Amino acid sequence: ETGVTQTPRHLVMGMTNKKSLKCEQHLGHNAMYWYKQSAKKPLELMFVYSLEERVENNSVPSRFSPECPNSSHLFLHLHTLQPEDSALYLCASSQEGTGGYEQYFGPGTRLTVT
Amino acid sequence: AQTVTQSQPEMSVQEAETVTLSCTYDTSENNYYLFWYKQPPSRQMILVIRQEAYKQQNATENRFSVNFQKAAKSFSLKISDSQLGDTAMYFCAFMKHNNDMRFGAGTRLTVKP
């Protein structure tokens, strides 16, 4: 266990549904991330939150909406997704300012859009 | 933009043998961090080893070591005495100081008994 949890672990949703992914970190970190992992492609950084403020948004479609209510929790709200959005969504956290910068990953949510 | 290239999509090694995974990156920065992450089948991605670019000494962690060649922008991972539990996807990653971590496409390593 890395100290980062994600729920649900698996999600199947239709293109008209609205769902949310949840991430929680128990490491006292001050930065959190969402990544998309598709088969045979590098991990794609989607969003970065530092001290609960969004600092990175890598041209992600608006059908993905992040929320960071506090430093321990991160959500990814999903609506009107497309089949090509099916992927493993990974959450990660890190501690800024102390060097190292390694990120700790959650187990991921396997999302299937039908 | 920084890019990370892992030229070996798949590799295999016999148990107890040594294997080296390749990684190259492209950057104009002088200070940065490099990482190797391991993602076992259906399990969480975990950090294997990291290297600060300003350090000339290669990082080591037990059976894992790196060969960091800054001028060549190369960062290979050597796994000694391979174990069945080393079977996983291995990702090389590059990061400047601003939390923007870039990953390679990964190398699938299979350790054979």
Image (spheres, coloured by chain):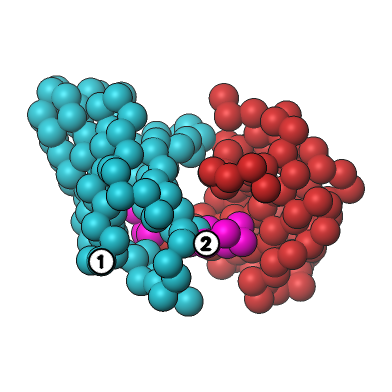
Chain colours: A red, B cyan
Placement of A33 over or under A95, stated as above or below: below
Q: Which mark is residue B110?
A: none
Query: Residue at 70% across / 69% down in the picture?
Result: A57
- The answer to which image quadrant residue B22 occupies is bottom left
Residue A37, how many percent across, how many down?
51, 55
**Residue holding disc 1:** B71
Q: Neighbour class for label 2 at 10 Å: few (<14), some, many (≥20)? A: some
**Secondary structure found at label 2:** loop
Query: Residue at 25% across / 27% down in the picture?
Result: B63
Quadrant for the C terminus of chain A, please: bottom right
Residue B76, how many percent across, how many down?
24, 50
The chain letter under disc 2 is B
The chain letter under disc 1 is B
The amino acid marked with disc number 1 is Ala
Which of B104 and B42 lies nearest the eye of the viewer? B104
Residue A99, how many percent across, how many down?
58, 45
The residues tagged by marks 2 and 1 sit, at their Cα atoms, a distance apart of: 17 Å
The amino acid marked with disc number 2 is Lys
Residue span colored magenta: B96-106
To the question of a shared chain for discs 2 and 1, the answer is yes
Q: Earlier in the sequence, mark 2 or mark 1?
A: 1
Q: Neighbour class for label 1 at 10 Å: few (<14), some, many (≥20)? A: few
- Image label count: 2
- Left or right: B104 as drawn, with respect to B44: left
**Secondary structure found at label 1:** loop
Which of A114 and B43 lies nearest the eye of the viewer? B43
Residue A27, how many percent across, how many down?
70, 31
Query: Residue at 45% across / 37% down in the picture?
Result: B47
**Residue holding disc 2:** B96
